[in-house]
Structure formats: structure tokens, C-alpha cells
Amino acid sequence: MYPTDASHHLQGLKLAFARAGAGLMRLVYPPVCAGCGKMTDRPAALCPVCWGTVRFIEGPFCEITGLPFDHDRGEGLVSPQAIADPPRYAKARAAVFHDGVARKIVHRLKYADRADLAPMMAAWMVRAGRDVIDDSDVIVAVPLHRGRLFSRRYNQSAELARMLARLTGKPFLPGAMRRIRATRQQVGLGLRARQDNVRGAFLAVPEQAHRINGLKVLLVDDVLTTGATLEAATRALLRGGASRVNVLTFARVASQGEETLYA
């Protein structure tokens, strides 16, 4: 009995030290709002003011692209844009619009080593994308080219995908797709330039084909802007054997025009 009691005692000590360490870290680095930097009661959270400014994406929206309509057109309707130029992916969903506080959160995850924001962001994505999550078998993140990965130290999309896998139980396949060509930053490029920039940039790794062959893939990225990157990645996954690709992002840019809820 003694070894068992000793083991329990040791586990209790470890837990006590862990709690003490967490308390010390909160004193040295108190939790602050991910939007404005004001102190909050827990890490990676928003204060009430910032929370109130986030524009969550709610229905009614296009069943395919996930872009909100200007008024309620009923369930399951598709936008003229999706009919005229259907994307290669089956459905796309996003949690919030890419502006204000949400834009700051994305930038901090992407450029300021704030990987601690990924759990909060992924939780919002689960709420927004339950239908595409349920309709997918595995999760794949949009990969970075190795040169950009080296400079950033981690792939923000992979961090979101990893947290989504933990929250949903869906397998995350980090090596299933590779970015085989270094591309320019998409920021500042028009739609045609973005499409040209990422054409042929992705490859579903042949040695990993058995992991996606015949399966429905949930493709994860941080932001959907024109959709050019996600379209290129979707093509690579379909060529690699995926039966269907759904898209889930944390944020999306609100397009101008009468078919959007926000101009």
C-alpha cells in the first residue's frame, strides 16, 4: 500500500506546485484583454467592451460561401455569386468578420507569437462551423512554405487546426499537404493576382495520400479574403484523393455589394 500512497502524495505535490506556478505567472504576467490590453479575469479573453464590438457571422447566409445576405431569404439558399462561379470547396464558414478587434486578434496570433489565442479562436470557430465540422472526417491546415515557417516559428493555421481537433475529436493531419512554392504575401493583391500567386503552390503529399483518400476534409485557415488560397489548397486536396473539402476560417472579409449584410 505504501507505494500507492506515496504516488498519490507525489501527484498531490506536483499539482500544488503547478497551481502555485500558475498563480505566480498571473502575478508576473496578469491576464489582459486580447483586444485592448486591459486586465481581465482570465487569459486569452476579451473585456466586455471589446466583446461587444466583435461582429459574429450569423444567418441568413449563402449555404455554399457562408457570406451573409442583406436580408432573410430562407434556409439553404445560394448566392448568385456561388451559382455563377461555384468554388471548388463544398461549403465555407467563418466565425467573425475581419475588422476591428477580430483583426487585431488575427494579427497577434499571426505575427506577435500569441499562440495562446488559438483556443479562444478555435472555440468561436466550432460554434460557427458545426455543420461543416460534422460533415468532415479529418482536419488539414493551409500550410506555410518552409521559409516563412522558419521566420514566423509556427503556422497560425495549424495552431487553429490543432485546437479544433482537440475540441471536436476529429483527426488533425499536419503532414497531409505541403506548400511547394514560396509565394508573395497576398496582402494588397487583387483577385486575379492572388489566384496567379498561389496557383500550383500546394501539393497533397503522395506518401500521405492514404490519410485523405476518399475522406471529407475540413480545410482550416485564419482568414478568408478572396478565397484564392483556399481554392488552390482545395484543388490540391481533391487531386490527392479527398472526396470533398469544406472550409472553416476564424474570420472573413466582408465583400461589398447588395448580397452582403455589411457593406
Image: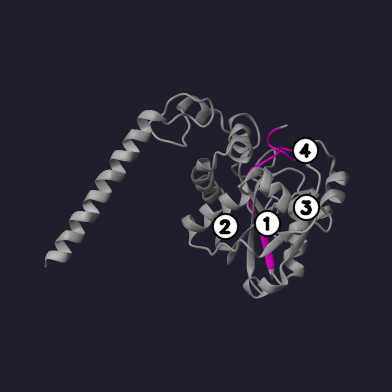
Check disc 3 and give the amino acid type. Answer: Ala
Q: Earlier in the sequence, mark 4 or mark 3?
A: 3
Q: Earlier in the sequence, mark 3 or mark 1?
A: 3
Secondary structure at numbered mark 3: helix
2 or 4: mark nearer the eye: 4
Q: Earlier in the sequence, mark 1 or mark 2?
A: 1
How far, Cα to Cα, is label 3 from label 1? 10 Å
- Is residue 208 shown left or right of residue 130? right
> Considering only vertical position in the picture, is 160 above or below 255?
below
How far, Cα to Cα, is label 1 from label 2? 9 Å
How far, Cα to Cα, is label 1 from label 4? 24 Å
Q: Earlier in the sequence, mark 1 or mark 4?
A: 1
- The magenta segment is 244-262
Check disc 1 and give the amino acid type. Answer: Lys
Mark seen at residue 187: 4
Q: Nearer the viewer, residue 231 or 152?
A: 152
Q: Residues within 10 Å of mark 4 (few under 14, many from 20)?
A: few
Residue under label 1: 91
In the rendered image, which quarter contains the N terminus? bottom left
Residue under label 3: 82
- Is residue 128 shown left or right of residue 263? left
Mark seen at residue 131: 2
Check disc 2 and give the amino acid type. Answer: Asp
Secondary structure at numbered mark 2: helix
Residue name at image x 51 percent, y 32 percent: 34
